[in-house]
Image (cartoon, rainbow, N blue to C red):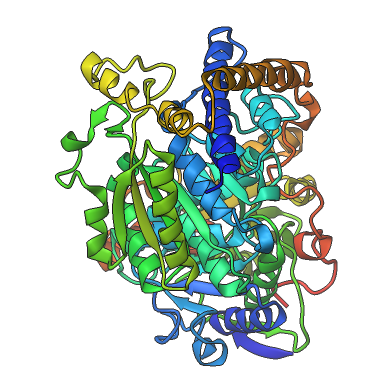
Amino acid sequence: MSKIDRKRLLREMIFFRRFEDRTFEAYMERKIGGFLHLYSGQEAVATGVLEVIQADRGIGFDYVITGYRDHIHAIKTGAPAREVMAELYGKETGSSKGRGGSMHIFDPSVRFMGGYALVGQPFPLAAGLALACKYQKEGRIAVCFLGDGANNQGTFHETMNMASLWKLPVLFVCENNLYAIGTAIQRSTPMVDQYKRLAAYSIPASQHYGQDIEVVMEAAQSAVDHVRSGAGPYFLELLTYRYRGHSMSDAGAYRSKEEVAKWVQQDPIQILAKRLIEAGELTEEEFKAMEQAVQDEIDNDIVRFAEESPEPKVEELTKYVLEDKPNPRWIGPLEAQGGGHG
Amino acid sequence: MAELAYWEALRRAHDEELANDPMVIAMGEDIGVAGGTYKVTLGLYDKYGEERIVDTPISENSYTGIGIGASMAGMRPIIEIMSINFALLALDTLINAAAKIRYMSGGRAQCPIVMRTPGGTAHQLAAQHSARLARLFMGTPGLRVVTPSTPLDAYGMLKSAVRCNDPVIFIEHESMYNLKGEVPDEEAFRPLEGAEVIREGTDITLIGYNYSVHWCLSAADKLAQEGIHAEVIDLRSLKPIDRETIRRSIEKTHRVLVAEEDEAPVGVGSEIITGIIEDCFFALDAQPVRVHAADVPVPYNYHLEKLAIPDAKDVYQGALKVLGKV
């Protein structure tokens, strides 16, 4: 990886951290409603895996799908950060035109096929995207991000069975942050190492340290190579940690201060920054300037765009339920001639 | 004009749509090598291969979800679920995903899937193989729900459903697969919306959908022997409902009965009669009546099953009640 790449990735992770912190502030100001699940602490996972997957844009975007902790996956896939913020504000300029909110960011223009708020639901949808990739033979793959809690849903087992049976080109990325909402992993499954569960489905799987983006990228590269080769799915487990509670309504009291402090010491941004500074690729001053520039961009551009954007029109409440202008030949009205009963 | 059985009509629609568009695939349990529980995909595996006619494991929620995911990437899957009871396992992907993806993406993504499944009671299949559940899907925004009652509609509506960009719940009936009817030799489409007056009359309107249409027709025959002219409406689509056709008929007959195989509480008839009260209260000369299933799990015993599920006789007697003749 080049020096420039490492600096860019550092800046991206700072951007993602600040983006989430800013949404926290906007939520407290009551400008963002509903549920809000933040990604802070896990940045190296989405940044590293998606950097590898979409390094080769010759074939265009691969499909990416995820759960409800989806803002950063969307932005790193290519959804404009302005539109993601506007979606959180419920504005017409949002990624889903204000109809989806935090948990349902979509941007099919970059093949980001959504965040979903039913735990485990994206597994089969991802396999379906992969089925289409395999059938259409354009060289694409599908990538599915989900937390460790999702692996206890039936969809995990059903989908792994079919994905393996049909050798679908899908990369499952398990973001193991050790908690399913507020329940510690050892209290929800006897098999704490998630990658070991895949042996039951003959899917190759491995576990890696998810706080070091270079470790993530190396692991992701070999997983992606496997999937792109046509050998079938791969399950990548990355050990990570979320700093905040599950959502804004969760203070995270089920975790000890010592545990949180231990993980904050393993901050993905600090790990990479320290490495770059020690290697002489970055100075402390440059790092600080980078943080300031990101903050300015988010406050002056991203948030401003969201705040100044219009609300959806009330007369469009029922738009997008069904197709706007379906072909009347298929849909209606009923032909005058030729009744169904002869 | 050929006479086809309902299952043959569905099979022909599959064949033509698979031939027409390479993005059309069929998925489901036993539909490939085994040819389908109701023969609807018989021979298509040999003709189109395993990539187009996909035999799935018994995993309804996830294979339906796989169909939905594939549809988001440009495919047009026809998903067969062997019995509507098993569709309950797929409700998450159908109701929480397929029905909502267009809306919660602000119209940027869509799920053009068809979920085909037989609802209804056949012969002594007992509680877990006799559900109807049309009412469950018609209460979900973002879905289309169609209930073809003839081979012509089965053929033409399935072709339309495959080409429709919305998710379509296509409800068949276990007792209708061998029903015969005329289907034109040339390609034809039947629209997914719009009820149809299938028998003209002046004295009472009988409204049915799916199998209950046939009870209405046979009740109308019996009423005719007594000089009563019943008009029969085949709803064809439960979502959306064609309230206009119902209104026009009631303004002519001033009396109405709704026949459904679903149970009554929160049934299809509840919705239809509410619409009638809203649209044509002052045109009614008598209280509307609904004929519906008993509010019990369907029993295995032959006689008890008969009691639980209505038939043409119940429609006939219900009509006499509306007409004030009992």
**B221 or A283: nearer the viewer:** A283
**Near-viewer residue (B305 or A311):** A311
Which residue is found at the position 49% from the left and 23% from the top? Answer: A35
Confirm whether residue B205 shows in the render.
Answer: yes
Q: In this view, does B54 lie to the left or right of B194?
A: left
Q: Where is residue B79 in the image (x, y as percent from the top left)?
A: 51, 67
The reply to whether residue B84 is in sight is no
Measuring 56% from the left and 41% from the top, which residue is drawn there?
Answer: A3
Instruction: Give the residue at x 52% y 54%.
Output: B260
How far from the left and from the top, in percent, is residue A15? 58, 27
Q: In this view, does B41 lie above or below A144?
A: below
Is residue B320 positioned above or below B163 on the image? Answer: above
Q: Residue A134 occupies which quadrant of the picture?
A: bottom right
Q: How many marks overall? A: 0
Residue A278 in the image: state x and y as whole percent: 43, 30
Furthest toward the left, the residue is: A190
Between B122 and B23, the one nearer to me in the picture: B23
Question: In the image as oriented, which residue stretches furthest toward the right?
Answer: A336
Residue B220 or B299: which is nearer the viewer? B299
Give above or below for A146 relative to A275: below
For the point 68% across and 53% down, the residue is B204
Quadrant in which the N terminus of chain B is drawn: bottom right
Return the residue found at the far front: A280
Side (left or right) of A338 relative to B261: right
Q: Where is residue B186 in the image (x, y as percent from the top left)?
A: 78, 87
